[in-house]
Amino acid sequence: MDQFFQQILNWLTVGSVYALIALGYTMVYGIMKLINFAHGEVFMIGAYTTFVGMVYLKLPFLASLLLAMVFAGLLGFVIERVAYKPLRKSSRISALITAIGMSLLLQNIVIKIFGADVLTLPEVSVFPSLTFGNVVINGNQLLIFVVTIILLVILQYIVYHTQIGRAMRAASIDYEAASLMGINVDFVVSFTFVLGSILAAGAGSLVAAYYNSLSPAMGVSRGLKAFIAAVFGGIGILPGAVIGGFLIGGIETLVSLIGLSLWREAAVYFVLIIILLVKPSGILGKKGGTKV
């Protein structure tokens, strides 16, 4: 039973990270119908900014986390304005190729600056570990839960209780109509990129703190699986991204629990194929449903 509860904690830890990254994918797709494949690299740059904050600027972890989210927000704004805005009226394949190119560009910039080797983040100890019988909640697991809950509550408030949130939801339903109704869709799109990048950078910092390591390739696999999480839940739908993130975390934990950890990614893709065959729009997706 102790092993069961320990695996539940692992599931929630991994699922929280995927959910934060998947929200960025789903918000951008909900408004622009664009799959931003550079999003995984924003996650990675969030980890490297935290590294710079802790190692070079000698900041504590939480200050480095905020630094990473601010820098990633600015980066998301620049990426949207430089790479995607000029392609608004181009074909989707052009935007898709640009997203892949931006992903490779960001990864190679990081390799040029920091090298391709795995770096070690200083140990993070914001919260002490908690013990309940034989079940241990690692301090960094607790950190992931707390930060994830705070970010999800803030996102929920922004999307459903602010003017910019109402504009985001209107643009996701009908981009052209929102523009004709006087909504500044350029600002809405830029704000969406900034918001998604902040969440991704937060996830990158938490992952670096949890594993005490970071590398230029860390955004590729996690970014791809977070995208799958968004598809699982119904891409373009916020609760769907969160559900998809925890579903993928659950699949990976379950496969590892039965001793098949090398098959974790294969299991994720297998379940994705099954879901797409049975319900192509995802778990919460439905034709004509409200998005973002």
Image: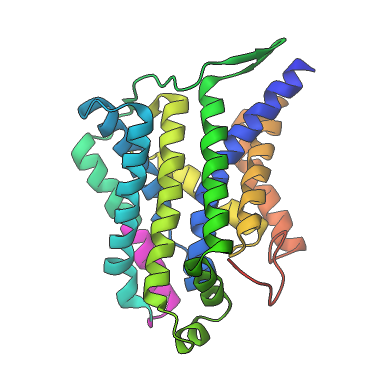
Viewed as shown, does residue 44 lie left or right of 286?
Answer: left
Viewed as shown, does residue 257 lie left or right of 47?
Answer: right
Magenta segment, which residues? 89-102
Quarter of the picture holding the N terminus: top right
Viewed as shown, does residue 49 lie left or right of 91?
Answer: left
Where on the picture, by quarter, is residue 91?
Answer: bottom left
> Can you give x and y, in whole percent of width and height, for residue 273 in the image?
68, 55
> Can you give x and y, in whole percent of width and height, for residue 218 in the image?
41, 39
> Can you give x and y, in whole percent of width and height, for residue 33 in the image?
50, 72
Q: Residue 31, relative to residue 266: is it above or below?
A: below
Q: Quick check: is 284 in the magenta stretch?
A: no
Tell me the residue at 59%/63% (across/down). 160
User: Mainly helix, strand or loop, the magenta region?
Assistant: helix
Which residue is outermost to the top? Answer: 133
Give the mark count.
0
Q: Residue 171, relative to residue 145: is it above or below?
A: below
Q: Quick check: is 95 in the magenta stretch?
A: yes
> Can you give x and y, in whole percent of width and height, for residue 66 in the image?
36, 40
Where on the picture, by quarter, is residue 257?
Answer: top right
Is any atom of residue 89 visible in this view? yes
Tell me the residue at 56%/19% (across/down). 138
Tell me the residue at 34%/76% (across/down). 87
The figure's colour scheme reads rainbow
